[in-house]
Amino acid sequence: MGLMDFIKKQFIDVIQWTEASDGTLAWRYPMADMEIQNGGVLVVRESQIAMFVNEGKVADVFGPGTYKLTTQTLPLLTYLKNWDKLFESPFKSDVYFFSTRQQIDQKWGTPQPITIRDADFGAVRLRAFGNYNYRIADAKLFHNEISGTRDNYSVDDVDGQLRGLVLQNISNAIASSGIAFLDLASNQLAFAQALVKQLAPEFEKIGLKLEGMTVQNLSLPEELQKILDQKIGMGMVGNDMGKFMQYQTAQAIPKFAEGAGSGGSVAGDAMGLGAGVALGQVLAQNLQAGLSSGPAQAAAYAAAAQAAGVKPDEVMATLEKLADLKGKGVLTQEEFDAKKAELLKKLV
């Protein structure tokens, strides 16, 4: 190799990054002892940002495109180096490339149950997990706050920091949403949207844009899960008392079935199951239409109820259940009053 060939290899004519693999957020062009040739070419591909750093100071930032490197295309670097005329000799500068592609399917989760505040229940312990996606939005800020002067900074390097941000802000997200926790828990899309609203500003502080989040699973304490299931069931039937009683009957049937293996007689279990089915049918058919239309229908309902083994104390038991649901926040006062009025008419 001749002397001139050796000298030529010390100058860089084309600066570019081909991203050989996924998962890299920031990459420093390997300068070694080389210098950038005056009039050299900078190639920045789509989904990339290039940044020149001189003596620790961020200078010029370039989006996608092809650039000829002169004092006109490097105005800040020209100012930092105090070039009072067009530079003609090669120069040294650190060049960093940043990937602005979305980093998708990033996992988040609660390794242990976390406690959050809730207006209805005081404190709730939950476990949740899902995924999120983000991209670099401000390369200069990300360089100054996170990646620094490292040759390579990957998605894995920032993963722990971002997971911590999610866990730290879950409680604040629920509180600031203004939505009752049970409503959030029954609507995972609303839960995810509340998280995004809370977390987006936190990501922006380090130069990232949070593009979206999902909540794939939410685990609650058993007693709270039962209340949530009841609330979802009530949401399905609305204010239709007939459907409400059908729903209650459907919930009771598995309990009758469980009694078969607990020492009770097969006949007794069958009678209990039959009574439950009959109760659901009678109440579904007669609760609204029968009693609100007059004494004759009321008498017909009473006869049907008596035939099915329904007694006034069963109506009172239903009222007690409704009161319990109201106390737990599943029913509003208005819903409870409406259902109570309907049931009490059956005792007149």
Image (cartoon, grey):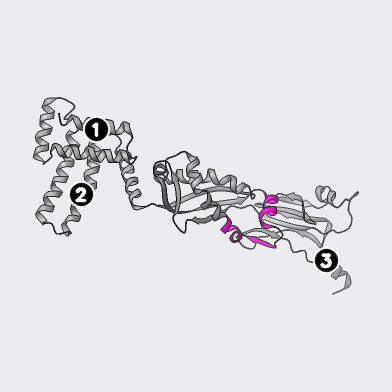
In the image: residue 211, left or right of residue 16: left
Q: Is the magenta stretch mostly helix, strand or loop?
A: helix
- Measured as percent of width and height from the top left, residue 239 is found at 29, 34
- The kind of residue on which mark 1 rests is Lys
| Closer to the eye: label 2 or 3 | 2
Q: Nearer the viewer, mark 2 or mark 1?
A: 1
Under mark 2, the amino acid is Ile
Q: How far apart are marks 2 and 1 (CA)?
A: 24 Å
Q: How crowded is mark 1: few (under 14 residues within 10 Å), some or many (20 or more)?
A: some
Q: In which quarter of the image is residue 312?
A: top left
Q: Is residue 99 above or below residue 172?
A: below
Name the element at disc 2.
helix
Q: For mark 3, what is the residue?
A: 10
| Label 3 element class | loop
Q: Which corner quadrant holds the N terminus? A: bottom right
Q: In the image, which residues are magenta?
A: 137-161
| Residue 15 position by quadrant | bottom right
Q: Name the residue under label 2.
A: 253
- Residue 211 point in image, percent of width and height: 56, 47
Residue in the foreground of this view, choosing between 47 and 212: 212
Cα distance in 3D space between marks 1 and 3:
89 Å
| Residue in view at x 85 percent, y 70 percent | 6
First in residue order: circle 2 vs circle 3: 3
Task: Give neighbour class at mark 2: few <14, some 14-19, many 20+ (Cα, 10 Å).
Answer: some
Any part of residue 319 in sight: yes
In the shown orientation, is residue 220 left or right of residue 249?
A: right
* Amino acid type shown at disc 3: Gln
Query: Which of the marked residues, 1 or 3, is nearer the chain's N terminus?
Result: 3
Q: How far apart are marks 2 and 3 (CA)?
A: 83 Å
Q: Is residue 236 above or below residue 110?
A: above
Q: Is residue 105 magenta?
A: no
Residue occupying image coordinates x 20% and y 33%: 343
